[in-house]
Image (tube, rainbow, N blue to C red):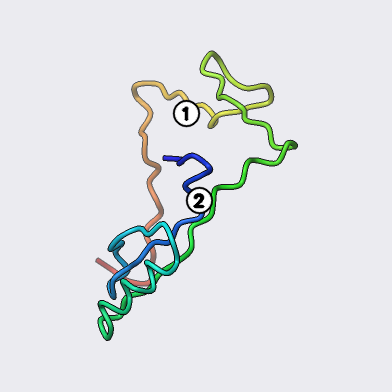
Amino acid sequence: MVLPDHFYPYWSVYDKLGEKYCDCSHEKYAITTLELHEGEGFTYKRIDAPKPLPPHIVDVDAQTDGELPGQRGLPEQKRRLPFESVLEELPQSDLHKI
């Protein structure tokens, strides 16, 4: 979710496990929250507004009909006749008798 520009920057406070504890509109409120939880490993981080995409980046939708130009799928499976075996037999080794 993107907030309106006037909400930025804000400060997020995290507990010792790294889970968000709260958001603060001013840095002094984040520092006060840390002071209230002194010794509990709380931290805070400034959150700035997301930057817009540079103009040279183009957003492209995927084509769902047919294939894209130049796209090749996996090769087709070799067609076998009903009497052909699917697995090839490997020769037995002469080293160890079974």
**Residue positioned 51% across, 26% down in the render:** 76
Query: In the picture provided, is 78 more to the left or to the right than 14?
Result: right
Q: Residues within 10 Å of mark 2 (few under 14, many from 20)?
A: some
Q: Nearer the viewer, mark 2 or mark 1?
A: 2
Q: Amino acid at mark 2?
A: Tyr
The residue at which mark 1 appears reads as 77
In the displayed structure, does residue 70 sit left or right of residue 37? right
The x and y percentages for residue 81 are 40, 21
Q: Which residue is mark 2?
A: 8
Res 57 → quadrant: top right
Q: Nearer the viewer, residue 28 or 3?
A: 28
Q: In which quadrant is the C terminus drawn?
A: bottom left
Give the quadrant of residue 36: bottom left
Spot occupied by residue 69 in the image (x, y as percentages of width and height): 68, 22
Could you say which is closer to the camera, residue 36 or residue 58? 36
**Picture residue at 41% right of the left edge, 57% below the top:** 25
Q: CA distance from mark 2 to mark 1?
A: 57 Å
- Name above or below for residue 69 compared with residue 20: above
- Disc 2 and disc 1 in contact, CB within 8 angstroms: no
Residue 7: assigned label: none
Q: Residue extending furthest right?
A: 56
Q: Earlier in the sequence, mark 2 or mark 1?
A: 2
Foreground: 9 or 79?
Answer: 9
